Amino acid sequence: MYFISGITGKIGGATAQQLLDAGHSVRALARDPQKATAWTQKGVEVRAGDLTDAQAVASALEGVEGAFLMQPTPFGVSPDFPEATALNGSFVAALAQTPPPRLVVLSSVGSEQTSGLGNITQTHLLEAELRDLPFPTAFVRAGALIENFLGLLERAASTGWFDSFLQPTDHPFPMVATADVGAEIARLLIEGWDGHRIVEIGSPITPDEIARAITQVLGTPVKARSIPREYWTQTLKTMGLAPDQIGNWEEMEDGFNAGWIHFGVPGTATVTGTTSPAQVFAAATNPPTL
């Protein structure tokens, strides 16, 4: 039995499916179990509960062989990171009460840095809270999720442009598909490891390559172009970010562009992504029929 958080999301769902396919049992928490009915039908033990409820998390950890914890990441992040603080406190209390034999934690590229991270500060704080646990713990630092670009496909197809905060467009940035992240988390849980370890997962991908993948899948010529820095604030307002959330987003993108947020940290294990942007986009635009 493995406990998987975020099962109704892409990474938690991908991890759970990998475990089920390998013949293992899965337990999860859901604020509204009705939204996880598809998982219940697959045999997952879905309990009602919230990750900010330490007692619910501790109870869900009872008797498991391993656990996966992650912070659900909102689109916009407030300056003082109240959501992450509440989750981190819950995790610390739950793990002290019911320590699992091993734990995998979803983190992010750049989380080793202590400043200049913007939104990624959330996972830096999470690593800081959990780095000294007295049982095997693995932090999986994922690159930027390719699925985050899905919301831009329609606009790219209609305008012919893939607009990106990343610049220049021919520079590679660490990116990864959620399926690859879920596969690595499941592998770690099943195979185990000793002590504490950090895994960087993803591959260098350029915005130009993202544009070419959109062209390939949609059949419409699309080119990448960087959003000029002076237009970021207005662009983010248009995207729906609250005024107090814009600074964290801009700081994160500045960190990527400056190379401050990057892969290749000494002492980390490297896992290359195998799912291409074109595969991610094709799966989203042509879902399998049942």
Image (cartoon, helix red, strand yellow):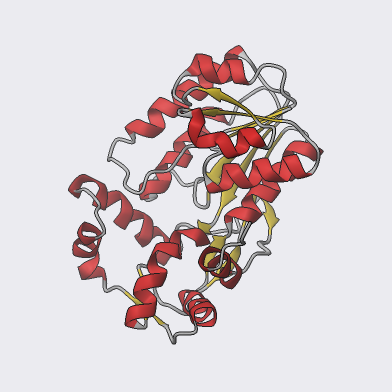
Considering the image in quadrants, where does the C terminus appear? Answer: bottom right
Viewer-side residue, 189 vs 141:
189
Q: In this view, does 232 lie above or below 109?
A: below
Is residue 96 found left or right of 84 in the rendered image? right
281 shown above or below 220: above
Residue at 60 percent of width and 44 percent of height: 13
How far from the left and from the top, in percent, is residue 255? 39, 58
**Residue found at the far bottom of this picture:** 221
Q: Report whether 265 appears left or right of 26.
A: left
Choose top left, top right, bottom left or bottom right for residue 264: bottom right
Q: Where is residue 282 in the image (x, y as percent from the top left)?
A: 56, 70
* Camera-nearest residue between 142 and 39: 39
In the picture, measured across the screen, residue 267 lies left or right of residue 213, that is right
Query: What's the residue at 20%, 69% (across, down)?
Result: 230
Q: Is residue 166 visible?
A: no
In this view of the protein, can residue 167 be seen by the observer? yes
The answer to whether 20 is drawn above or below residue 48 in the figure is: below
Which residue is farthest front?
A: 290
The N terminus: image quadrant: top right
Front residue of 58 and 29: 29
Q: Where is residue 267 in the image (x, y as percent from the top left)?
A: 67, 48
Q: Position of residue 96 (x, y in %)?
A: 58, 15
Q: How many marks?
A: 0
Q: Could you tell me which residue is drawn at 64 percent across and 20 percent down?
A: 61
Residue appearing at x 52%, y 44% in the figure: 9
